[in-house]
Image: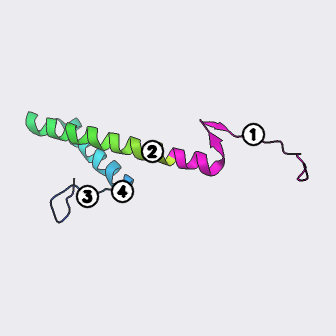
Amino acid sequence: MSTDKEGKPSERSFEEAIARLDEIVQRLEAGNIALDESLSLFEEGIGLAKYCSVRLDAAEGRLEVLMGFENGEPKLADFNQDEGE
């Protein structure tokens, strides 16, 4: 993970995290790396997968709000309701 000026992990975009996760999977699937490096990459990959999952859940929640969904179901309203009632 990249770091900021103070050496702390910096925030990645979702796309950057997916790209890095893809790199990690390719390296692990190649199978020609030491055990310690494999474990380190696997640990980073798990963190990236969790990060991406959280970001996707947040995006889904925002879409539900924007599209009028509640608990995964569309909010229903009477289309023919008069404004004067």
The picture quadrant where one finds residue 47 is: top left
The picture quadrant where one finds residue 31 is: top left
Label 1 vs label 3, nearer the camera: 1
Left or right side of 83 for 11: left
Quickly name the residue at label 3. 10
Q: Position of residue 59 (x, y in %)?
A: 49, 48
Quickly name the residue at label 2. 56
Label ID, residue 32: none
Q: Position of residue 29 (x, y in %)?
A: 23, 36
Q: Earlier in the sequence, mark 1 or mark 3?
A: 3
Label 1 vs label 4, nearer the camera: 1
Q: Is residue 27 visible?
A: yes
Amino acid type, label 1: Leu
Measured in 3D between alpha carbons, the distance from the residue under mark 1 to the one under mark 3, in whole angstroms, is 42 Å
Who is closer to the viewer here, 65 or 83?
83
Q: Earlier in the sequence, mark 1 or mark 2?
A: 2
Measured in 3D between alpha carbons, the distance from the residue under mark 4 to the one under mark 3, in whole angstroms, is 10 Å
Q: Earlier in the sequence, mark 3 or mark 2?
A: 3
Measured in 3D between alpha carbons, the distance from the residue under mark 2 to the one under mark 4, in whole angstroms, is 12 Å
Left or right side of 69 for 56: left
Measured in 3D between alpha carbons, the distance from the residue under mark 1 to the one under mark 4, in whole angstroms, is 35 Å
Amino acid type, label 3: Ser
Label 4 vs label 3, nearer the camera: 3
Amino acid type, label 2: Leu
Q: Find out whether the residues at labels 1 and 3 contact each other: C-beta distance under 8 Å.
A: no
Label ID, residue 13: 4
Q: Find out whether the residues at labels 1 and 4 contact each other: C-beta distance under 8 Å.
A: no
Quickly name the residue at label 1. 76
Measured in 3D between alpha carbons, the distance from the residue under mark 1 to the one under mark 2, in whole angstroms, is 25 Å
Q: Name the residue at 33% across, 40% down.
A: 49
Tag 3, which secondary structure?
loop
